[in-house]
Structures are given as structure tokens and as C-alpha cells.
């Protein structure tokens, strides 16, 4: 089977890996011919070209900046232009290839033109991996006004994409509930759980935790609390800053923040201005190095802005689960990620902005190493049971012709 995957979030190399490259590796490992079309954003330079790795052909197309930009006009134009850029790229670089299955992940929500083209030309199965619900996410964060011209435009595109998709894979039960309640024209039978997933790899113990901490200048004798991932508006970074301030006198703990995004400089300036001694901030690092740091951490943090009315399910929680870390999630009330964590006894969920509840749960984890270890074991079991690419692959392939 020839499989085509459309995305703006494919890693620059397979050494970095993410949920998208892992899923494509799963398809390739099962004998399929895998093709990826993704963006090469303007800030990264370079031309449109094909790369091949692990048997996967990756077409990187020159686009304007889409991610990690405060220029919302450029971001909007990029999403509008992307489908036509993809169609031209497919015609030019993949001529004569018949695509049996087309997978695509949001954001953006503007794929409908290219999906329509592929379905008409190849009669492909079209499977949407719904990772982001637009335009409501932008409305929640105050970036777009409900009922505005732009809102109406993207809402039309959203509905068209749902309509043209044969199947829609959602990240959690709350995702499905929200989608069906707010889009009553979607037949419930085309919607199912197809969660964010990663390939289960053998855990190779490369070096002792003490050496990892020494390598990255992490204190050896403290409880290391890790936040890894995007540092943008969706995370409600202001609450992370409140947490750092509330714990700046605690000599038992050490916060390690790793990531990039529009709010990175705000965090950097806050750490500098407050002269925190138990906080370290690192920019984006290769996945191999990040995995090492995960092994040396004790607790994983997750943040989602409390204004969200859509149920998000951040990818980075999988890293924590994979590496046996208990999770402390401060989220909005719409998502079910905190509930899932608590039901499976691998961490705690609190409302984003509720500092008292956050501190209470954090102090419980800091004080009890046995509790952390048990929750960490449960985290790994949940990862293997629910969030492997093998499970996502089987879900998708159940619809193959």
C-alpha cells in the first residue's frame, strides 16, 4: 500500500523523531511504501526537495512561517496557501504514484482542497488525525474573535475538512464528545479514538543517572521537576512563572525547563530578573539528549491554559509516560488528560491557575519517593497499553480496502 502523510510538524531529521515520524516508521515497518509531504518554513531556509530515511520519502516544501511565530498575518496566509503548495509539490515530485491511503494531521485545518484532489485522482481513503481544533483554539486564547470574517472563513474550512474525511481519529474520549456536540452533521460512525502515539523501543541504559545529571549540570541530590515542550500561549506560561516564584526558596527541588516557542524570552527574562537558583532554562535540544534528561528527572509537568474550551492532549505527556515519570498536569476543565492520569494512578490533574492545589500535589510527589516510583511504573504501563504506534496503526488499517 502507498501511504501519503501531510503535515507541518515532521521533524527535520529522524534523529529528532516525534509522533508523526514514529507513526510513519510503523507503517514502513509493516511493509508499506510511505511518502510524507511537509513544510520547510521560511526561517529555516533551503529549497523544496525530497529526502529519504528508513525507507520513507519526505518531501519538504518551501512555505512561509507557520509555527512559532508571533506574526499571525503570516501564519494565516501560510495556512491558506499550503494546500496549493502541496498539490503542486505532489504533482512535481511524486508523479505516477497511486496513493491508497492519505493521512493528515491538524493544524492546519485548510487541507480540504488537497484532500479533495487526492480523493478524486486516486480514490484514496482519507483519514484525519485531529490534533488541534481550529478556529476555536484561537478564540479561546483571544487571538480570534468569534463571528469575525476570519473565524467564519476557518470555520467553513474546518467543516469542509470534516466532511471530506472518511474517518476522523481523535486523541481522547473528550475530543470525540466535543467534536460531535459542536458538529452535529458529522456521522458518529466516522469518528474514533486514534490517540497520539510513539513506537515502543527497548530502553537502553546508556549511562547512570548521576552521570547524566553531571553532563547537563543538573544537581545530583535534588528532586528534578521537568517541563519539556512548547513554550507558547496555549500553555498559559504565566502559571508556570507563578509556580517557579512559589517554589524559589525550596532547597529540595530543581526545575528544568526545556523547549521553544513565542514565550521563551518571557520565561528567560523572569528567571534572570528574579535570580532563581533552582531553575534552569534550555532551548530546543535533539531528541536523543532530551531522552537522556528524561531518564534523570523525577516529575514531569504539563500546562494548558485554563481558557481552553476544547479538549487538548499535548504530545509531550507521552515522553513522561514512556520514561516512567509521574505527571502533574495543570490544565483547563475541558480536557480529560488529568482525569486519565489520575484514573491510571500515574500522576495528578489540577485546574490551571489553582496554585494551592498545584502546590499540594507537588509537595506530595516531592516528599514521597515510593509514590513517585509507583506512579512512574503505572505511567509506563499506560504508555505501552494505550499510546503505542502499533495500536494507532491497527486502528487506521482496520479501514483499509
Image (cartoon, rainbow, N blue to C red):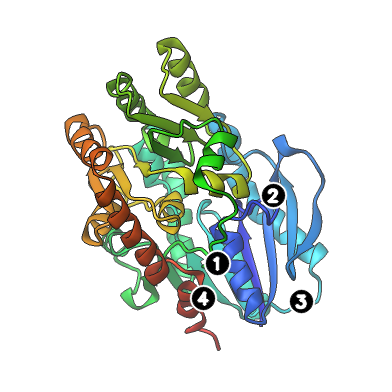
Residue 35 is drawn in which quadrant? bottom right
Q: Quadrant of the N terminus?
A: bottom right
- Mark yes or no: residue 148 visible: no
Q: Quadrant of the C terminus?
A: bottom right
Few, some or many residues within 10 Å of mark 1 (<14, 14–19, 20+): few
Few, some or many residues within 10 Å of mark 3 (<14, 14–19, 20+): few
Q: Could you say which disc has been placed on residue 202 in the image?
A: 1
CA–CA distance in space, label 1 to label 2: 23 Å
Q: Could you say which disc has been placed on residue 12 in the image?
A: 2
Q: Position of residue 118 (x, y in %)?
A: 64, 71
Q: Position of residue 132 (x, y in %)?
A: 44, 52
Q: Nearer the viewer, mark 1 or mark 4?
A: 1
Which residue lies under the disc numbered 3?
97
First in sequence: mark 1 or mark 2? 2
Secondary structure beneath label 3: loop
Few, some or many residues within 10 Å of mark 4 (<14, 14–19, 20+): some
CA–CA distance in space, label 3 to label 4: 22 Å
First in sequence: mark 2 or mark 3? 2
Residues tagged 1 and 4 counted as in contact (Cβ below 8 A): no
Amino acid at each position: 500500500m502507498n501511504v501519503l502523510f501531510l503535515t507541518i510538524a515532521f521533524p527535520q531529521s529522524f534523529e529528532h523523531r516525534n509522533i508523526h515520524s514514529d507513526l510513519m516508521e510503523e507503517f514502513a515497518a509493516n511493509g508499506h511504501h510511505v511518502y510524507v509531504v511537509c513544510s520547510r518554513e521560511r526561517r529555516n531556509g533551503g529549497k523544496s526537495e525530497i529526502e529519504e530515511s528508513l525507507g520513507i520519502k519526505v518531501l519538504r516544501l518551501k512555505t512561509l512561517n507557520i509555527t512559532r511565530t508571533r506574526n499571525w498575518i503570516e501564519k494565516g496566509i501560510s495556512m491558506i496557501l499550503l494546500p496549493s503548495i502541496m498539490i503542486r509539490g505532489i504533482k512535481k515530485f511524486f508523479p505516477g504514484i497511486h496513493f491508497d491511503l492519505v493521512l493528515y494531521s491538524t493544524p492546519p485545518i485548510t487541507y480540504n482542497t488537497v484532500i479533495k484532489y487526492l480523493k478524486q485522482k486516486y480514490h484514496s481513503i482519507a483519514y484525519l488525525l485531529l490534533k488541534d481544533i481550529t478556529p476555536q483554539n484561537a478564540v479561546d486564547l483571544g487571538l480570534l474573535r468569534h463571528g469575525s470574517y476570519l473565524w467564519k472563513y476557518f470555520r467553513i474550512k474546518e467543516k469542509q475538512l470534516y466532511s471530506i474525511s472518511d474517518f476522523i481519529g481523535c486523541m481522547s474520549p473528550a475530543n470525540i464528545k466535543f467534536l460531535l456536540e459542536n458538529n452535529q452533521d458529522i456521522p458518529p460512525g466516522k469518528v474514533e479514538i486514534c490517540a497520539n502515539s510513539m513506537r515502543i523501543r527497548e530502553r537502553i541504559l546508556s549511562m547512570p543517572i548521576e552521570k547524566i545529571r553531571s553532563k547537563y549540570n543538573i544537581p545530583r541530590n535534588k528532586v528534578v521537576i521537568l517541563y519539556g515542550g512548547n513554550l507558547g500561549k496555549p500553555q498559559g506560561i504565566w502559571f508556570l512563572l507563578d509556580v517557579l516564584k512559589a517554589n524559589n526558596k525550596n532547597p529540595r527541588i530543581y526545575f528544568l525547563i526545556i523547549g521553544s516557542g513565542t514565550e521563551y524570552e518571557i520565561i528567560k527574562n523572569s528567571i534572570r530578573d528574579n535570580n532563581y537558583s533552582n531553575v534552569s532554562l534550555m532551548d530546543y535540544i535533539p531528541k536523543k539528549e532530551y531522552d537522556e534528561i528524561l531518564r534523570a528527572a523525577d516529575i514531569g509537568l504539563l500546562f494548558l491554559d485554563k481558557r481552553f474550551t476544547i479538549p487538548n492532549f499535548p504530545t509531550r505527556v507521552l515522553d513522561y509516560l514512556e520514561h516512567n515519570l509521574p505527571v502533574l498536569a495543570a490544565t483547563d476543565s475541558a480536557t480529560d488528560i488529568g482525569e486519565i492520569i489520575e484514573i491510571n494512578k500515574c500522576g495528578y490533574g489540577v485546574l490551571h491557575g489553582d496554585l494551592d492545589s498545584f502546590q499540594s500535589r507537588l509537595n506530595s510527589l516531592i516528599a514521597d519517593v515510593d509514590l513517585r516510583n509507583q506512579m512512574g511504573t503505572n505511567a509506563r504501563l499506560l504508555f505501552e497499553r494505550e499510546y503505542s504506534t502499533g495500536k494507532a496503526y491497527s486502528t487506521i488499517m482496520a479501514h483499509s480496502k
